[in-house]
Image (cartoon, rainbow, N blue to C red):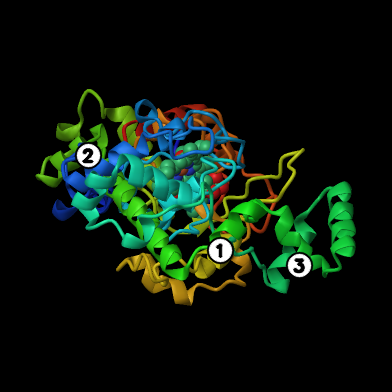
């Protein structure tokens, strides 16, 4: 095999070095639930909710519409499609229990809070808080009470068909907004932003959020009015029930684990003291092993590390802009602001206080960090072969296409800066095949 020679950046590790690294990619004993079935009452209830299309405006969309069990709980299409089309790819939910932040921009700090997003999103389920409460009362009351305690008395009486509070709008700092503005490349789009700002009599940078993917979609005025007309006690109880909906779904999602791959089998054998040659198997052979060396040599594990092959952080990998994009996706730069401002259901709010790692990080995140422009969550690489397409916007149809990006790396990122540790791989065809074989064994 041709050795890598383009820079010191690529040094293929020796067998000893590979062996030393391997344990960092294995799940520890306590992380090993080895379970893939809903067992407790709460998990089973969450599973029923996950598959129930009644929690949607048209009665046809459930979580499983996009997170399909036979597709590793994703959907196989570039951009998720519910009541309408969003702007990002549906991520797989396998092993999501180990994630720290949720969504590509990490705007939710717990799995519980995450589940509430799509329900009230007009392009996904398009439902609302009171619709969820009514459905729960009608179809799930006894199961709900068994898992979460008595049904609140303030939710016994008559309720409006649809009601939910106004969402807080995305408010970018002038620094971030100015930077975003400078990244818009189409003159027509710039023109539109200026015109809209003038019409609404706001500053240009106040107008920018409306042209980013993270902008909160409008809640119908009638729903907001119906919500505001509810007594506070009822609102509070509805929020409690809604939070429990998130708890049930999250309990089910935590049962979705897939952690025993050909790679793990190989790594465990090595861990028992066998040599690499003795540990290779029919599904993890020389090809996959050479791919592993390339993976380590190319420093992919700077970001794709740990048992998930993800550092659970956010990075800009220098994706170029694509023509025809109507709005800009600044990724984590907006995600930080949303995570810090999601008053009701963040870990800082009254309803979902979670003792999570991410909650501790929340106050320290810098909402003006320009490095987060165009940065997205490092996806786990486990089961990666089973869930094409790739990238936060599903732009890469195959793993080969994704690796071709890393092999060449465009000089300029479409938004923000490409992280400097990333260097073009310039791998040969054979090396790319080996790297892909390794990824397929995860
Ligand atoms: C219309 C398709 C669609 C529906 C319906 C949908 N999702 Fe998603 N899901 C997505 C997309 C797209 C994303 C990524 C969005 C983003 O990052 O902004 C996502 C993200 C997630 C994530 C974050 C995963 C991660 O690794 O960060 C979880 C968890 C999730 N969805 C669970 C659910 C649950 C639970 C439901 C039902 C209440 C649901 N989804 C309904 C498309 C959908
Ligand atoms: C600087 C951190 C970083 C490094 C280094 C890195 N990645 Fe990534 N990787 C990411 C991020 C972030 C994404 C998602 C980017 C996006 O869609 O905007 C990603 C996406 C991917 C995906 C697509 C997965 C999916 O579900 O969409 C694959 C495959 C992948 N990387 C493999 C590699 C390989 C192989 C290497 C080494 C050559 C590597 N990565 C190096 C951060 C990194």
Left or right: residue 72 versus residue 229 is: left
Q: Which residue is mark 1?
A: 229
Which quadrant of the figure contains the C terminus? top left
Can residue 69 be seen by looking at this rendering?
yes
The Cα atoms of the two marked residues, 1 and 3, are separated by 30 Å
Q: Is mark 1 within 8 Å of ligand 1?
A: no
Residue 208 drawn above or below residue 128: below
User: Does dot 3 land on a helix, a strand or a loop?
Assistant: helix
Q: In the rendering, at what x and y percent does residue 369 appear? A: 60, 70
The label nearer to you, 1 versus 3, is: 1
Q: Decide: few, some or many residues near mark 3? Use Cα within 10 Å; few <14, some 14-19, many ≥20.
A: some
Can residue 425 be seen by looking at this rendering?
no
Q: Which residue is mark 3?
A: 206
User: Does dot 2 land on a helix, a strand or a loop?
Assistant: helix
Q: In the rendering, at what x and y percent does residue 221 appear? A: 66, 55
The label nearer to you, 1 versus 2, is: 1
Mark 1 / mark 2, whichever is N-terminal: 1
Judged from this view, the residue extending furthest toward the top is: 282
Q: Residue at x 20, y 36 (%)?
A: 37
Name the disc covering residue 264, or none: 2
The label nearer to you, 3 versus 2, is: 3
Q: Decide: few, some or many residues near mark 2? Use Cα within 10 Å; few <14, some 14-19, many ≥20.
A: many
The Cα atoms of the two marked residues, 3 and 2, are separated by 49 Å
Mark 1 / mark 3, whichever is N-terminal: 3
User: Does dot 1 land on a helix, a strand or a loop?
Assistant: loop
Left or right: residue 372 versus residue 148 is: right
Judged from this view, the residue extending furthest toward the bottom is: 363
Q: Residue at x 22, y 39 (%)?
A: 264
Q: Foreground residue, 141 or 91?
A: 141
Mark 3 / mark 2, whichever is N-terminal: 3
């Amino acid at each position: 095999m041709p050795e890598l020679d383009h820079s010191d950046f690529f040094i293929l590790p020796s067998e000893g070095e590979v062996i030393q690294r391997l344990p960092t990619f294995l799940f520890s004993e306590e992380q090993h639930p080895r379970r893939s079935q809903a067992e407790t009452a709460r998990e089973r209830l969450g599973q029923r909710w996950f598959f129930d299309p009644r929690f949607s405006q048209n009665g046809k969309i459930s979580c499983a519409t996009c997170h399909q069990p036979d597709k590793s709980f994703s959907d196989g299409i570039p951009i998720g499609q519910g009541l309408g089309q969003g702007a990002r790819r549906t991520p797989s939910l396998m092993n999501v229990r180990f994630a720290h932040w949720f969504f590509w921009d990490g705007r939710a700090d717990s799995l519980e809070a995450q589940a509430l997003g799509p329900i009230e999103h007009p392009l996904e389920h398009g439902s609302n808080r009171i619709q969820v409460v009514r459905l729960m009362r009608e179809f799930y009351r006894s199961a709900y009470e068994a898992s979460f305690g008595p049904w609140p008395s303030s939710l016994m009486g008559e309720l409006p068909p649809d009601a939910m509070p106004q969402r807080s709008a995305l408010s970018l700092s002038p620094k971030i907004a100015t930077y975003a503005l400078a990244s818009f490349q189409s003159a027509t789009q710039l023109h539109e932003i200026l015109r809209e700002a003038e019409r609404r009599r706001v500053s240009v940078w106040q107008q920018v959020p409306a042209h980013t993917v993270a902008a909160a979609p409008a809640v119908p005025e009638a729903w907001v009015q119906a919500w505001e007309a509810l007594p506070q006690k009822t609102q509070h109880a509805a929020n409690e029930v809604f939070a429990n909906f998130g708890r049930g779904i999250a309990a089910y999602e935590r049962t979705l684990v897939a952690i025993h791959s050909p790679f793990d089998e190989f790594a465990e054998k090595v861990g028992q003291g066998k040599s690499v040659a003795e540990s290779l198997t029919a599904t993890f052979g020389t090809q996959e092993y050479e791919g592993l060396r390339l993976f380590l040599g190319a420093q992919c594990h700077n970001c794709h590390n740990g048992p998930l092959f993800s550092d659970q952080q956010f990075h800009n990998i220098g994706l170029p802009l694509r023509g025809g994009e109507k709005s800009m996706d600044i990724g984590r730069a907006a995600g930080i602001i949303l995570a810090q401002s999601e008053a009701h259901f963040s870990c800082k709010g009254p309803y979902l206080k979670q003792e999570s790692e991410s909650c501790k990080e929340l106050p320290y995140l810098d909402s003006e960090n320009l490095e987060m422009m165009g940065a997205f969550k490092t996806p786990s690489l486990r089961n990666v072969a089973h869930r094409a397409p790739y990238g936060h916007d599903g732009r890469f149809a195959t793993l080969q296409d994704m690796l071709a990006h890393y092999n060449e790396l465009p000089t300029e990122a479409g938004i923000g800066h490409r992280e400097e540790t990333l260097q073009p791989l310039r791998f040969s065809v054979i090396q790319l095949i080996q790297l892909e074989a390794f990824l397929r064994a995860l």
